[in-house]
Image (tube, grey):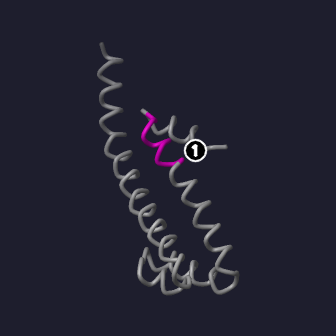
């Protein structure tokens, strides 16, 4: 019985953390997908400004887009989207923080 109570307590603590991580990842995924669709018609910097994220990330994205061709920035966004979707899946499947960490490590 005490193990069951401990398991329920651990899951309740992890549940909020897991849910907040999934929500944050969803927000980033939506931003990146919006940027990718914008890149079909426009250059990178206007797309970054139309679909902002945090200022540090946007500054890095602008620097990257000015340093490399548009196709490299699109490839980077696609790669980052794949990684984010894997992270979301790991957080969704994991029952404990240790399981999430094990899923995320290569």
Q: Which residue position holds label 1?
A: 104
Identify which residue is drawn at 57% across, 39% down. 103
Quadrant containing the N terminus is top left
Q: Is residue 6 magenta?
A: no
Residue 69: image location, x then y, percent: 69, 81
Residue 105: image location, x then y, percent: 63, 43
Magenta stretch mostly in which secondary structure? helix
Viewer-side residue, 12 vs 32: 32
Residue at the top extreme, as displayed: 1
Residue 26: image location, x then y, percent: 40, 57
Identify which residue is drawn at 44% across, 63% down. 28
How crowded pointer 1 is (Cα within 10 Å; few <14, some 14-19, many 20+) is rated as some
**Up-down: is 82 above or below 106?**
below
Identify which residue is drawn at 58% across, 61% down. 80
Residue at the front extreme, as displayed: 41
**Up-down: is 105 above or below 68?**
above
Identify which residue is drawn at 40% across, 52% down. 21
Q: Secondary structure at mark 1?
A: helix
**Up-down: is 57 above or below 13?**
below
The part of the image, by quadrant, that contains residue 9 is top left
Quadrant containing the C terminus is top right
The part of the image, by quadrant, that contains residue 77 is bottom right
* Left-right relation of 100 to 11: right
User: Which stretch is magenta?
Assistant: 86-94
Q: How many marks?
A: 1
The part of the image, by quadrant, that contains residue 62 is bottom right
Residue 98: image location, x then y, percent: 51, 36
**Up-down: is 70 above or below 88?**
below
């Amino acid at each position: 019985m005490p193990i069951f109570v401990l398991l329920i307590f651990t899951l309740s603590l992890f549940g909020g953390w897991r849910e907040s991580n999934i929500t944050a990842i969803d927000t980033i995924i939506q931003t990146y997908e919006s940027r990718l669709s914008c890149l079909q018609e426009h250059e990178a910097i206007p797309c970054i400004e139309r679909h902002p994220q945090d200022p540090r990330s946007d500054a890095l994205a602008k620097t990257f887009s000015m340093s490399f061709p548009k196709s490299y920035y699109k490839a980077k966004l696609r790669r980052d989207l794949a990684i984010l979707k894997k992270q979301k899946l790991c957080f969704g499947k994991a029952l404990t923080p240790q399981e999430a960490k094990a899923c995320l490590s290569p």
